[in-house]
Amino acid sequence: MDTFIFVQARQGSTRFRNKVLNKTNGTELIKIQYKRLLKVKSKKKIVFLIPKTKNQKLKRFLISNKIKFFEGKENDVLSRYYEAAKKFKAKKIIRLTGDCPLIDHRLLDRLIRFFNSSKFSYVSNIIKRSFPHGMDMEMFNYNTLEKIKKSAKSKFDKEHVTSYITKNRKEFLIGHLLNIKNEKKYRITVDYREDLKLVDKIINYFKPNIYFSTKQIVNYLKKKPHLVKINSKYKIY
């Protein structure tokens, strides 16, 4: 197995503490995300990358649910990725974050096919945004990660993992995963409590199905435009 989905997650978000362990419809956000990731058809391993310190509740949750995890540095998330990639001998890495519980397995399969059929060293849907915020995904090879690790010096780049790539695009072969329609105005990530309120509305609308698609989410929000106002005060970047 050479393709790994690494999901960075922590308890200590300053904007919304313990958000990944918050529940909607009786289930933790991180568990919903994990179940949705299991639907990815491509061969993969899923590992949650968590900080070593102050995350015992999250660690106990992962252990009790038999979810594979790796513990690394809290603020140097780039090192967390690099050390995890070395440990698991990951040749190809997909980077996700725990604040995107509704990540779509269909898009991930599309990302993997796109990356594997190209010569790009980095592919994402976040540099040129066209998908809803909350469907954020990146894929790169081990050599790219190693290059970032050696080159990134700032605290910001170490915390944000791939920001060095976006600031030094000429150093990398970059591919862009694009949507047919521009739907970047929709915010379905979870950074704040208002975000959770919207995600809760979405999950409860589709329950008991938790495997609904990005297209289904967008169509629902188009029919219920007032729901988008729940978290509209927060910037979509």
Image (cartoon, rainbow, N blue to C red):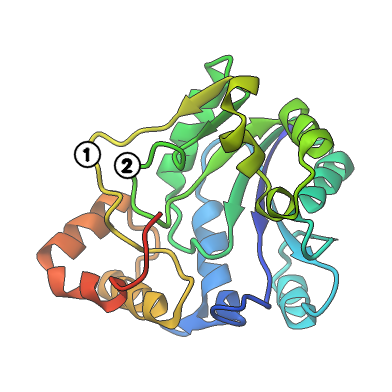
- Expressed as whole percent of the image width and height from the top left, the position of residue 92 reads 69, 32
Which kind of residue does numbered mark 2 sit on?
Ser
Q: Is residue 218 left or right of residue 59?
A: left
Mark 1, residue position: 181
Q: Is residue 68 above or below residue 121?
A: below
The residue lying furthest to the left in this view is 223
Q: In which quarter of the image is residue 93?
A: top right
Quadrant in which the N terminus appears: top right
Q: Is residue 38 above or below residue 224?
A: above
Q: In this view, does 214 lie to the left or right of 41?
A: left
Q: Observer-nearest residue: 109 or 197?
A: 197
Quadrant in which the C terminus appears: bottom left
At numbered mark 1, what does the secondary structure look like: helix, strand or loop? loop
* Distance (Cα) linking label 1 and label 2: 7 Å
Residue at the location (52% across, 62% down)? Answer: 33
Q: Observer-nearest residue: 78 or 138?
A: 78
- Expressed as whole percent of the image width and height from the top left, the position of residue 128 reads 40, 36
Question: Do tag 1 and tag 2 residues touch (Cβ < 8 Å)?
Answer: yes
- Expressed as whole percent of the image width and height from the top left, the position of residue 85 reads 80, 41
Which kind of residue does numbered mark 1 sit on?
Lys
Q: Observer-nearest residue: 73 or 41?
A: 73
- Expressed as whole percent of the image width and height from the top left, the position of residue 212 reads 33, 57
Mark 2, residue position: 130
Q: Quadrant of residue 141?
A: top right
Of the image marks 1 and 2, the number of the one nearer the N terminus: 2
